[in-house]
Amino acid sequence: MKVAIVHDYLSQFGGAERVVSEMARIFQDAPIYTSIFHPEMTWPEINHYRVFTTWLQNVPGSKRHFKLLLPLYPMVFEQMHFKNYDVVISSSSSFAKGVNVCPEATHICYCHTPTRFLWSFEDYLSRQGIGTWSRNVLRPVINALQHWDLYAARKPDYFLANSSVVKQRIARIYGRDAQVIHPPVNVHRFKVAHKSENFYLIVSRLLSYKRIDIAVEAFNRLGLPLVIVGDGPDRAYLERLAKSNVTFTGYVNDTKVLDYFYRCRAFIFPGEEDFGIAPLEANACGKPVIAYRAGGTLDTLIEGESGLFFDEQDAESLLQSVQSSRKISWDPGKIRLHAESFCPENFQQKMINFVDEVTSKKAAIELRR
């Protein structure tokens, strides 16, 4: 069975790129097709596989400003024709699902989310700090891309979603059903820490939509130590907001991040993500997570076993959940066991089973004709 993998662009250190890497491990002979690929800007293991790019690779500025090429991507992916493959898997949060596949092949789209900058336009531009004039200029472009996106969403034979909330979005926006297969989390990097120090931890880029401000305000009031690992445009604002019990480390290497995971009392996750890998990494260390009840954590957190939710995205609600968590005797081994259910091996097996199932179904239909 000949398999090809298609991804939007390989120029970020993101969860979607981790999924592509894991897919390539499953289907080791499968080439990866993408619009642009800059090895130094994404996970190094991807460089071990055959990667084919498009003419966008040679466009000046594509390395740092690939998002500015937005109107060109639909044309680029529609120019991709897969005639000699049995299965094409598009890993997509935007354009890769728009490739053309021959009728005999099976096209599976692993959808990280319906295209966010198209379907949450105002919210997305607010996060990026884009002003009113630029929004007015962009609206006609966005409207045209929305029409194309709906057309492209009809091309895959099957959709996979990375979480239940994304499955719901796929149904609402594209009118397509999807099966949920959660992304792989490399829990093997971590070990269970049975002892904790009296501080709480956030590991995140410091962006406004991550809602780190809620955590800062809550811990200002609690007076408990909070360590915030990461950097970003909101750092100066958050530092002004914080009292002396809140520490900002900036960027630190993986070894230091692991050390913080092992020593913290609990992990704080105040934002809303499509999936969210960091909470499961904390769980893999045996640490409970205190998370806003929304997004991917609805799939990944077992209340009272691997952590606690807070219901309102504000400081008071988070504060109450932190206080409640301090009264619970958490079982690190049980928390770790929960995280292991998201291991790469489970992802691999689910992907193999799904591909086998849908290709067998298609073969049976062909035989009946």
Image: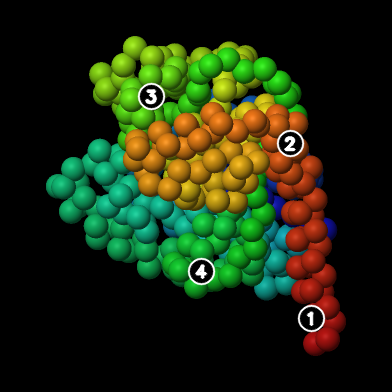
Numbered circles on residues, count: 4
Mark 3: which secondary structure? helix
Disc 4 marks which amino acid? Ala
Q: Secondary structure at mark 2?
A: helix
Which circle, 3 or 4, is nearer the viewer? 3
Residue 60 percent coordinates (x, y): 39, 34
Q: Earlier in the sequence, mark 4 or mark 2?
A: 4
* Residue placed under numbered mark 4 in the picture: 171
Looking at marks 4 and 1 on the same chain, the residue that comes earlier in the sequence is marked by 4
Dot 1: within a 10 Å radius of its alpha carbon, few (fewer than 14), some, or many (20 or more) residues? few
Q: Residue, x 24% and y 57% (percent of image)?
A: 139
Across and down, in percent, residue 46 comes to 66, 34
Q: Earlier in the sequence, mark 3 or mark 4?
A: 4
Amino acid, disc 1: Ile
Mark nearest the camera among 3 and 2 is: 3
Disc assigned to residue 365: 1
Residue 334 bears which disc, if any? 2
Q: Quickly name the residue at label 3.
A: 222
Give the class, few, some or many, for how many residues have Cα within 10 Å of label 2's Cα (few <14, many ≥20): some
Q: How far is mark 2 from mark 1, CA to CA?
A: 45 Å
Residue 136 image point, x, y percent: 18, 53
Q: Give the residue at x 53% y 16%.
A: 198
